[in-house]
Image (cartoon, helix red, strand yellow):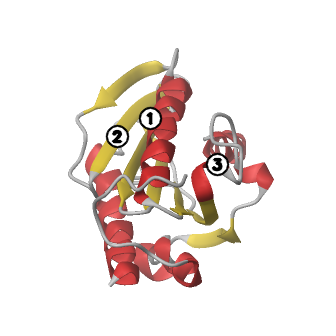
Amino acid sequence: MAPILAVLLLLAGCSSGDDGGGGPKVSASKGEELVLSFGDVGKPFSQFDEGEQRRTDMAPPRDDPDRFGREGGWKGRFQRGGTAKTKGPLVIESRADLFESTGGANKDFDLYKEALDELAFGAAGKTVEPAPKLGEEAHAVTFRQGVPPTAVRHYGVAWRQGNVTGYVLVNGFDGRLTLADAVGLARKQEKRIERASS
């Protein structure tokens, strides 16, 4: 399990002035409220990373911390043990990035789509999923790593909500993890963003 977890964490890490309109805006003072907390995922998960995103959390094409009037970014990462028979996520990553305008967030969302498609490119079982109903626009992909019976399934979901981009990446064993698992967590984060903007 340890080598698989190391790969999952590696993949999890890889992942301006005009106003594009739409949605209330969130202020930087509420940044930490924009990502999933332990209360959202609960036991048996444990949180192993949280707080502001650092340069080591960023990868091209979203590796400029000042892109598009970005005001900050936050993260929450969780894990639990399991076997090839364990249903649901084993690793959960939640991120949010805050921008001065919805236009900046819209440009970042475009980069998210590019990054997710690049992450999945060439992987076994790669699929661009139907966009879930999240925020004002959303994008989702899935791909598989490894071979049965220990193949690992990944689902990545990104969306834009006002001047915020949100992201959830979940990993679990193939056949035991679904897009619904990822979208369910993304909806919890979406509600957190909605509360922060009210």
Ranked by sequence position, the earlier of labels 2 and 3 is: 3
**Mark 1 touches mark 3? (CB < 8 Å):** no
Tell me if 54 is positioned left or right of 98 in this view.
right
6 horizontally vs 163: left or right: right
Q: Secondary structure at mark 3?
A: helix
Foreground mark, 2 or 3, reads: 3
Q: Are circles 2 and 1 on residues that touch, CB within 8 Å? A: yes
Q: Nearer the viewer, residue 126 or 26?
A: 26
Give coordinates of residue 118: x percent, y percent: 54, 25
SS assignment at label 1: helix
Residue at 37% x, 54% y: name it: 160
Residue shown at the point (78%, 53%) measured from the top left: 55
Which residue in the protein does label 3 denote? 67
Asked if residue 7 is positioned above or below residue 5 in the image, the reply reads above
Determine whether 86 is above or below 120 in the image: below
Q: Position of residue 105 (x, y in %)?
A: 46, 53
